[in-house]
């Protein structure tokens, strides 16, 4: 009788142990999620454009990012999009048009180190209309119109693309990129800084 009770207790304990361990695991995961702390930061990106030594444009952008206090973590991207949709003539008998997004795109993600540094990864794309080219528009019969009214002013798009991997301290402004447009000679400078949101 005693052997039967002991055997039954061992079988019952063995059958329940997977459920016990399965219930313990989510609790551990929940505590890890609760322990993942973040530091809210305000990231400022400033595009400055020069013609020779003369500053002609200064365009500031601000993003708010929750930076995990665990540098190894890979948080999601914070995204900013601003600009216009510019018409592009695609030709054909129907005189088709499409639209191209022109402006500034910034994607950012970050992590905050215990020593006060911010690891900041950014993808920056800036495009602009820097001129127009006259393109003849096809007539409905497929021939090309040579009259001035039969032309479309096609935009000429300038573009700048950069991916950054920076380590910053609060209040420190870093000149992360300096680039010269090979056609116009304009110089584009990008400064990045951050402050902790109190």
Image (cartoon, grey):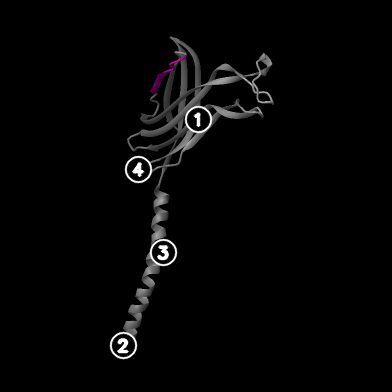
Q: Residue at coordinates 42% horizontally, 55% vertically from top-left? A: 30
Q: Quadrant of residue 76?
A: top left
Disc with the residue nearer the chain's start (1 vs 4): 4
Residue density around tag 4, few if under 14, some if 14–19, many if 20 or more, within 10 Å: few
Tell me the tag on residue 72: 4
Q: Nearer the viewer, residue 99 or 28?
A: 99
Q: Residue tagged by mark 2?
A: 2
What is the x, y in percent for residue 70? 36, 42
Q: Residue tagged by mark 3?
A: 23
Dots 4, 2 in contact, CB < 8 A? no
Mark toward the viewer: 2 or 3: 3
Q: Which residues are magenta?
A: 175-183
Alpha carbon separation for disc pair 1 and 3 = 45 Å
Question: What secondary structure predominates along the stretch shown in magenta?
Answer: strand
Alpha carbon separation for disc pair 2 and 1 = 75 Å
Q: Is residue 144 left or right of residue 172?
A: right
Disc with the residue nearer the chain's start (1 vs 3): 3
Disc with the residue nearer the chain's start (4 vs 2): 2
Say above or below: 55 vs 72. Answer: above
């Amino acid at each position: 009788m005693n052997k039967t009770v002991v055997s039954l207790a061992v079988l019952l304990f063995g059958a329940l142990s997977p459920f016990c361990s399965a219930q313990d695991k989510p609790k551990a995961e929940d505590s890890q999620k609760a322990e993942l702390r973040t530091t809210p930061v305000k990231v400022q990106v400033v595009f400055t454009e020069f013609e020779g030594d003369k500053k002609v444009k200064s365009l500031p952008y601000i993003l708010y990012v929750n930076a995990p206090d665990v540098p190894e973590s890979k948080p999601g991207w914070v995204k900013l999009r601003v600009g216009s949709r510019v018409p592009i003539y695609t030709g054909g008998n129907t005189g088709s048009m499409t639209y191209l997004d022109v402006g500034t795109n910034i994607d950012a993600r970050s992590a905050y180190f215990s020593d006060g540094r911010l690891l900041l990864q950014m993808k920056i794309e800036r495009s602009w209309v820097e001129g127009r080219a006259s393109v003849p528009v096809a007539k409905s019969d497929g021939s090309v119109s040579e009259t001035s009214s039969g032309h479309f002013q096609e935009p000429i798009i300038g573009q700048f693309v950069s991916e950054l991997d920076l380590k910053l301290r609060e209040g420190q402004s870093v000149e992360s990129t300096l680039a010269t447009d090979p056609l116009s000679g304009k110089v584009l400078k990008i400064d990045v800084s951050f402050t902790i949101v109190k």
